[in-house]
């Protein structure tokens, strides 16, 4: 635990924000560690089973909502956001209208954000240390039990919208979050106020109606959960609604009125790699595991593995218009070694009646 003089305490937050912007962060804020309201919301969410198979949401006990239990001595949190929108939203909307296009959530088109933000946070901590001397800290980027959105809201970076994403009045919601837990007793910024008003556009647009009430998302219905977090078979009841979304879903952000203020990211690491922003389903389905791992090196997508990649694409092909090309792509995988892949390929063949139309 490090105590600072009043003069340093007054100046340091301004320096931290200046250094953060120089490092490419879109905004930096500071919060205290009282997350009691968020803790209650989390407990209610878990009690309803909305976390699905994400056991990590509760297995750490109170560490997620009580920072000192995760990092001993934590007295303040430095919270940052970094814009990531790689291209105009109209391009995403066009992709969703093309049933043979592979839609990938915009956050995953470029380099893995964990690596980008973590390196910058470490550099920021080192700048602070060079200014005041050794202090206790630990940096996080979606890598530990941290209530990052609740912290960011308290730090003034935005408010948690009805879709559960953080929204900033000047930047929308297309940004990543990161934190530095520190033993410095820093003055906190003012928490953000909510500005969703009566708008329920995100609830209405959700393909699987996963936003069951304002500020309540049932992950078990969410396409991002189904295509990324879920390890087994995707429930049949949600497969048609998935459409051509093979990794994540951005519908609730695309419809949000506040995203009219979103700007294209200046961070080159978030530019689309391997033409993932224009990838076609049939091409993506043809990749063997070696090709998948090579193309996804340094990408957040790599963590779902080749098997779930094929599972997701099989569902999307099942939702595509019947054609000889779709049939050939699916039939090529009907004897795949993975039972999970075979089951989704069979559903795809039956769902869009490709097999019935072209089997002769």
Image (cartoon, grey):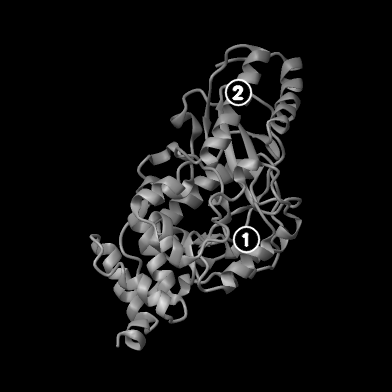
For the C terminus, the quadrant is bottom left
Instruction: Out of 28 and 269, give the one closest to the viewer.
Output: 269
Instruction: Out of 27 and 301, give the one closest to the viewer.
Output: 301
Residue occupying image coordinates x 51% and y 23%: 73
Q: Position of residue 245 (x, y in %)?
A: 49, 65
Up-down relation of residue 122 to residue 276 (above or below): above
Question: Regarding mark 1 in the picture, which secondary structure is present there?
Answer: helix
**Res. 76 in view:** no
| Residue with the mark numbered 1 | 253
**Res. 128 in view:** yes
Instruction: Out of 151 and 236, give the one closest to the viewer.
Output: 236
Q: Position of residue 218 (x, y in %)?
A: 45, 62
Look at the numbered discs 1 and 2 and tell me whether their residues touch, using CB distance below 8 Å. Answer: no
Residue 91 figure quarter? bottom right
Residue 2 figure quarter? top right
Q: Residue 180 carries which label?
A: none
352 on left or right of 258: left
Residue 191 figure quarter? top right
Question: Regarding mark 2 in the picture, which secondary structure is present there?
Answer: helix
66 on left or right of 151: left
Residue occupying image coordinates x 61% and y 19%: 126
Instruction: Out of 159 and 124, give the one closest to the viewer.
Output: 124
Q: How crowded is mark 2: few (under 14 residues within 10 Å), some or many (20 or more)?
A: many
C-alpha gap between disc 1 and disc 2: 31 Å
| Residue with the mark numbered 2 | 125
Q: Where is residue 202 in the image (x, y as percent from the top left)?
A: 61, 67
For the N terminus, the quadrant is top right
The first of marks 1 and 2 along the sequence is 2
170 on left or right of 123: right
Residue occupying image coordinates x 41% and y 75%: 326
């Amino acid at each position: 635990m490090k105590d600072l003089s009043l003069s340093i305490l007054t100046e340091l937050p301004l320096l931290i924000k200046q250094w953060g912007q120089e490092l490419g962060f879109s905004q930096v804020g500071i919060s205290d560690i009282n997350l009691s309201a968020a803790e209650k919301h989390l407990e209610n969410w878990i009690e309803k089973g909305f976390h699905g198979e994400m056991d990590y949401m509760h297995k750490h006990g109170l560490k997620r909502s009580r920072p000192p239990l995760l990092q001993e001595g934590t007295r303040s949190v430095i919270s940052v956001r970094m814009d990531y929108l790689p291209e105009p939203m109209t391009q995403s909307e066009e992709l969703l209208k093309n049933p043979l296009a592979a839609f990938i959530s915009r956050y995953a088109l470029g380099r893995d954000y964990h690596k980008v933000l973590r390196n910058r946070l470490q550099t920021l901590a080192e700048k602070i240390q060079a200014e005041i001397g050794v202090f206790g800290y630990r940096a996080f980027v979606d890598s530990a039990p941290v209530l990052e959105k609740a912290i960011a809201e308290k730090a003034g970076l935005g408010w948690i919208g009805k879709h559960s994403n953080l929204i900033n009045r000047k930047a929308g919601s297309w940004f990543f979050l990161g934190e530095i837990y520190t033993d410095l007793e820093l003055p906190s910024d003012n928490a953000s106020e909510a500005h969703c008003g009566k708008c329920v556009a995100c609830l209405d647009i959700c393909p699987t109606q996963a936003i069951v009430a304002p500020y309540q998302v049932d992950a078990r219905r969410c396409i991002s959960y189904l295509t990324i977090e879920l390890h087994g078979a995707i429930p049949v009841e949600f497969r048609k609604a998935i459409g051509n979304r093979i990794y994540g879903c951005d519908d609730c952000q695309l419809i949000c009125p506040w995203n009219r203020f979103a700007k294209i990211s200046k961070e080159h690491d978030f530019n689309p790699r391997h033409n993932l922003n224009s990838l076609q389903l049939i091409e993506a389905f043809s990749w063997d595991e070696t090709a998948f791992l090579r193309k996804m090196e340094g990408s957040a997508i790599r963590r779902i593995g080749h098997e779930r990649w094929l599972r997701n694409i099989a569902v999307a092909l099942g939702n595509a218009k019947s054609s000889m090309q779709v049939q050939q792509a699916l039939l090529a995988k009907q004897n795949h070694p993975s039972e999970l892949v075979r089951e989704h390929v069979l559903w795809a063949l039956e769902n869009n009646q490709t097999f019935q139309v072209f089997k002769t």
